[in-house]
Every structure is written in C-alpha cells, then in structure tokens.
Image: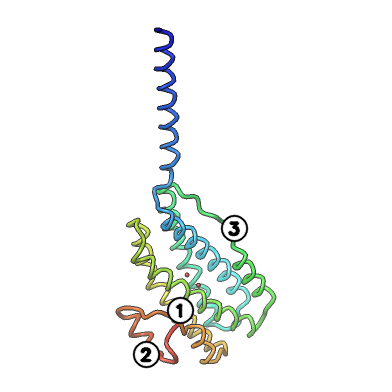
Amino acid sequence: MLRIAGGLVVAGLMVAGQAGAADTSTTGSQLSSKDTSFLKEASMGNQAEITLAQMAQQKAQNPEVKNLAQMIEQDHQQAQQKLQTIAQANGVTLEEKPTFSQRRTQSKLEKLSGADFDQQYAKDMIEDHVSDIKKFQKASEKLENSDLKQYAQETLPTLQKHLETAKSAAKSAGVDEATISSLTKNMPAMGGTGENEESSHGMGGQQRY
C-alpha cells in the first residue's frame, strides 16, 4: 500500500510538473493574436520600406524622390528599433523574410531606371503609406498592448508625413494629378492637423502600412 501511495504521489508530482512546464511555454508571448499579427506585419512593412528606400537612393534621379527615400529609410529604421524592443519584451520573434508581394514590388523596381523608376517608386510609396495609415489608425484604437498601441499612435504622424512627401515627389517626377488622386481616393479622414492638410489638397478625397 505504501508503495502504491508513494507511486501515486510521484505520478502526481510529475503531472503537476508537466502542467507547469506547459503553462510556462504558453506564456512565452504575452500578446494577443491580434496584437502579435500587427507587430509582425508592421515589422515586415518597415523592413520592406527600408530595402526599397536603399534601392531608390541608388537609382533615383529626381532629387525629391531621392530625399523621400532617405527620409523613409531613416524613419522606418527608427520605427523598427522600437518594434524590436516591444517584440523582445513580449517574447515574439520577428520574421526577416519579405512577403511574396514585397518581393514582387522589389523585382519590379529593379527592372526600371530613370524617370520610370522615379515615378513608380513614388507611386508605390503613396499606395503603401495610404494602406499603412489605415492599418495604424485602426491599430491605435483596437490594440490591447499599451506599448504597441502607443507605437501605432506615435508612428501615424510620420506615416502621414511620408504620404504627403511621396505625393509631392510623385508630382515632381512627372506623375499626373489624376493618378495621385486615384491612389489616395480611399484615404480615411485624419483628425487634427492631418485632416486639414488632406482637405487642403482636395482632388477627390484620399484613398498598404
């Protein structure tokens, strides 16, 4: 009987130990699935913007396009450093491989040169930042993690500045107003100063992170 009882106690301790180990493994990431998804997507977006900006600084001929690329690289590098800190604090490993869509965009730009490159890069940056702003506006309201929510809120003005600069660079590179308007037609209204800036540009309202 003592052996049986002792065996049961040992078995109970082993089960408890296994359960404790399982609990530890599941709490490695402290973020919800929604927050984790935003964190990983924002990171991949930063990395893609940095890669394209580095290419643009080498290939662009238009000074405004080159300046846009320099600003985007610097700002998204800083944003990525903040995300890395948040990810490490919450046990999340960030992917470094670009998505299929990002590889396709990079491949497309690699084949262009001169004015064709300048125009396409500027248009891509308009489209990317329209999408980013929409996602970051939603994230700033819906995310649960306070650090991630603050990151989204603090990054929004930078994304809006990138969009305005990309629109100006596109015009300088020869992209017509109708094309720029079509790229920004689904842009949500931005509160505060951003909203006033957007309305002042008119042309059919406003349209990736």
Residue 152 position in % (x across, y down): 38, 65
Nearer-N-terminus badge (3/1): 3
Residue type beneath disc 2: Ser
Q: Which mark is residue 141?
A: none
Callout 3: helix, strand or loop? loop
Q: Is residue 55 above or below residue 17?
A: below
Residue shown at the point (45%, 60%) measured from the top left: 38
Q: Is residue 41 above or below residue 116?
A: above
Q: Are marks 3 and 1 in contact (CB under 8 Å)?
A: no
Residue shown at the point (50%, 64%) measured from the top left: 46
Spatial distance from mark 3 to mark 1, Cα to Cα?
25 Å
Q: Are marks 2 and 3 in contact (CB under 8 Å)?
A: no
Residue 47 position in % (x across, y down): 53, 63
Nearer-N-terminus badge (2/3): 3
Q: Is residue 177 above or below residue 7?
A: below
Residue 94 position in % (x across, y down): 51, 53
Residue shown at the point (41%, 12%) measured from the top left: 6
Query: Which residue is farthest front?
Result: 1
Q: Which mark is residue 97?
A: 3
For disc 1, the marked residue is 163
Residue 63 or residue 100, whichever sits in front = 100
Q: Which mark is residue 200?
A: 2
Callout 1: helix, strand or loop? helix
Callout 2: helix, strand or loop? helix
Residue type beneath disc 1: Leu
What kind of colouring is applied to the model shown? rainbow
Q: Quadrant of residue 22?
A: top left
Residue 54 position in % (x across, y down): 57, 69
Label 3 neighbour load within 10 Å: few <14, some 14-19, many 20+: few
Residue 3 or residue 95, whichever sits in front = 3
Label 1 neighbour load within 10 Å: few <14, some 14-19, many 20+: many
Residue type beneath disc 3: Lys
